[in-house]
Image (spheres, coloured by chain):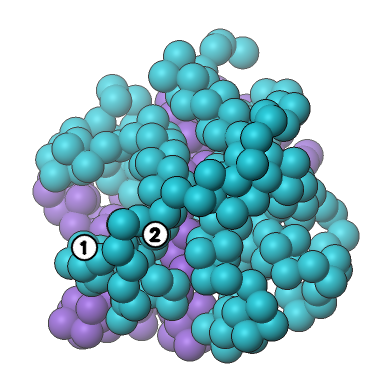
Chain colours: A cyan, B purple
Amino acid sequence: MGAPRADLLAVHVASLQHVAAPGAAFTAAQRLRIASVACDAYLTMDPSPPWVRPFGEAALDVAYRLGRHAGTITQQWYEQIITEGMHPLEWVEVVGIVVATVPVVAFARAAGLPLPVLPPPAPGAPHGRVADELAPATLNWVPVAAPADTTASVVQALSAVPDEWDNLWQLAAAQYMSDAQMVDPLWNRGTLSRPQMELAAGRISRIRECFF
Amino acid sequence: MLSWSSTEAGATADLAAIAEGAGDGGLPFGAELVAFADAVGGLDDEVLVFARERLRAAAGEAFLIDAAAVLANFEMMTRVADGTGARFPAETAAHRAALDDRLDIGRFTSAR
């Protein structure tokens, strides 16, 4: 088969390197464990039911459910995990790690390429870098960078942890399109038309039972 | 979004392709795309190989790669939305009611 676009390969490599670097709250080794759990959950032929917490460790259980049963996550479960002691920004970082990893694996599997191997962990302690000011949101369960609810909920979703937000939108620009390209309904890469892109996007979202 | 972009592009969208995986959405290679999306969303690797090769034969290698990238993107964005409790503003939700009903979105756990 032919090679994928260079920009797509580069952003996927960078995303896995991002996972393997210290984050705001988790070390690189912890982030890689979270990523590994999410990948395994995404790929397993024999998943645990959504309500089972296979690891008894909040970050890993969230990664597992998000990797495999994302459409079953409720606000009640989120609040239960937070009440048990996970910080809301740790939850946001776990989401950021999962969405930095799963699409790379999903692309390789879909395209028939070898599945990626996670890089070794980079040294260093968590850097603690979060948004200067946080705010509760009405359009998301999680806190976001202030001011809240001035952009779409998926846009502000990871804004409390800027490194995760940056990685997400770099992936989106290479896999789908950038914000600038999105405003032109006729923009495309010369392969799929915009309606074909939306057909694929809509069908996989329907299969995943994603309300949004 | 399918309905909106199809209208802008001069094609007529058929939401059955999204809602039931039926037909081609009124688009070139639509049936192959839907079958590929279904296979990526499933766990049967043999079905995925078949769907991938069917799309490649119909639309070409570059089309297949970009389709895989779009699907990967929405494996990502669905998890962003579901993992952060993303919601539409009330005024937007009202406009989406008919589309949500057609896609049977109200029964999704993530809609609660």
Q: Which residue is mark 1?
A: A151
Q: Residue at x 85, y 66 (%)?
A: A55
Which residue type carries mark 2? Ala
Q: Position of residue A11 (x, y in %)?
A: 47, 26
Give the spatial CA distance, label 1 vs label 2: 14 Å
Q: Residues within 10 Å of mark 2 (few under 14, many from 20)?
A: many
Q: Secondary structure at mark 2?
A: loop
Which residue type carries mark 1? Thr
Is A201 displayed left or right of A72 in the figure?
left
Q: Which chain is disc 2 placed on?
A: A
Q: Position of residue A112 (x, y in %)?
A: 67, 27
Q: Residues within 10 Å of mark 1 (few under 14, many from 20)?
A: few
The residue closer to the viewer here, A210 or A161, is: A161
Q: Secondary structure at mark 1?
A: loop
Q: Residue at x 63, y 63 (%)?
A: A66
**Among the 4 quarters of the image, the one containing residue A173:** top left
Q: Residue at x 44, y 72 (%)?
A: A142
Up/down of A73 relative to A206, above or below:
below
Is B102 displayed left or right of B3 in the figure?
right
Residue at the top extreme of this rendering: A2
* 1 or 2: tag closer to the N-terminus: 1
Looking at the figure, which quarter contains the N terminus of chain B?
A: bottom left
Q: Position of residue B106 (x, y in %)?
A: 44, 85
Q: Which mark is residue A160?
A: 2
